Image: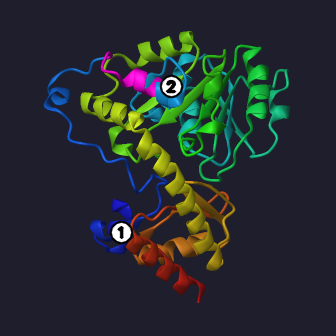
Amino acid sequence: MRVAAERFGIPFSDWLDLSTGINPQAWPPPAVPGSAWHRLPEADDGLEQAAARYYGAASPLPLAGSQAAIQALPLLRSPCRVGVPDVGYQEHAYAWRRAGHEVVSLPGCDLDRYLDAGSGALDCLVVINPNNPTGRRFSQETLLGWLEHLAGRGGWLILDEAFMDPTPGQSMLAHAGRPGLIILRSLGKFFGLAGARVGFLYAEAEVRASVGRFLGPWTLSGPSRWAAARALEDRHWQVETRSALQAASARLARLLSTNGLAASGGTPLFQWVQTERAGVIHERLAARGILTRHFQEPLSLRFGLPGEESDWERLEDALRLLSL
């Protein structure tokens, strides 16, 4: 956002940032005790137990955000063929390609033909579920079928579930620990704690151990561990927030549609709009201090949720002017 602030000459504090898909009504962390700042992080502070209860799966490996696993996993395999969505979080493809793997860009359609046994079959498959930015979801039945193909020849199915928290029943965590299945979770989106850099990896014991050895000790700071454990235990906030996000996302979809920008997909944390006018709309909104995420392939915009009522009114006014 600082780049946009400089480019458009609008002070940083005056922007409405809808580009991230991060919950604008973040979990409110209380004051961190001094001991969390003064002592080295300790593994017996209750974080892993809180995560296991929240996710409903044992043996989570804490990470400095799921990004840490995205960067580490490619370094743990010999060069192989890895399928990555052609539309999605681009750090996945970048990390695998940088580590010397052959990256196959996959369309957002039926992927079975890429998994059939043979010299051209994939060894690993990255699935962003739900996808960012399209919002597309894959059923557990489909994912388990792909896992069977991959695990049968020592491959991995890597599921990035960064946007899954509002709809936990659709997660694959009930199958955590199965051979070949790797699941990444993060506190950055639903909890709105992107700055804490907290995530978790779920995988079979050998993979967890390899990632843990690669990352080394103290992957999370003491204050981040302390805050994350309490956020994961705050059931009342979680239930209320899931309901609020569903309502806000539906409101955003209606607002966009009313102004000629019907959503092509989305999640409770954002709406995605495909339009040939994506670049023009992005620029015109930015000129009014409203930042969206602009994608070139395909031409589209991602709108995160406004936070305060004044933010909703500001977006509505800007969209109305665009549609005149």
* Residue 195 within the segment the image draws in magenta: no
Image quarter for residue 8? bottom left
Nearest the viewer among 200 and 149 is: 200
For label 1, the residue is 15
Instruction: Tell me the element at label 1.
Output: loop
Identify the residue shown where x is 65% and y is 74%. Answer: 257
Instruction: Tell me the element at label 2.
Output: strand
Region rendered in magenta: 43-52
Identify the residue shown where x is 55% and y is 46%. Answer: 166
**Amino acid tagged 1:** Trp
Of the two numbered discs 2 and 1 in the rendering, the one whose residue sits closer to the viewer: 2
Q: Quadrant of the N terminus?
A: bottom left
Magenta stretch mostly in which secondary structure? helix
Instruction: Report crowding for label 2: few under 14, some 14 to 19, many 20 or more residues within 10 A (C-alpha).
Output: many
Q: Count up the numbered dots.
A: 2
For label 2, the residue is 201
* Residue 51 within the segment the image draws in magenta: yes
Instruction: Report crowding for label 1: few under 14, some 14 to 19, many 20 or more residues within 10 A (C-alpha).
Output: some
User: From the viewer's perspective, is 318 left or right of 175?
Assistant: left
Q: Say which label, 2 or 1, has the lower sequence index.
A: 1
**Amino acid tagged 2:** Leu
**Figure check: 229 above or below 42:** below
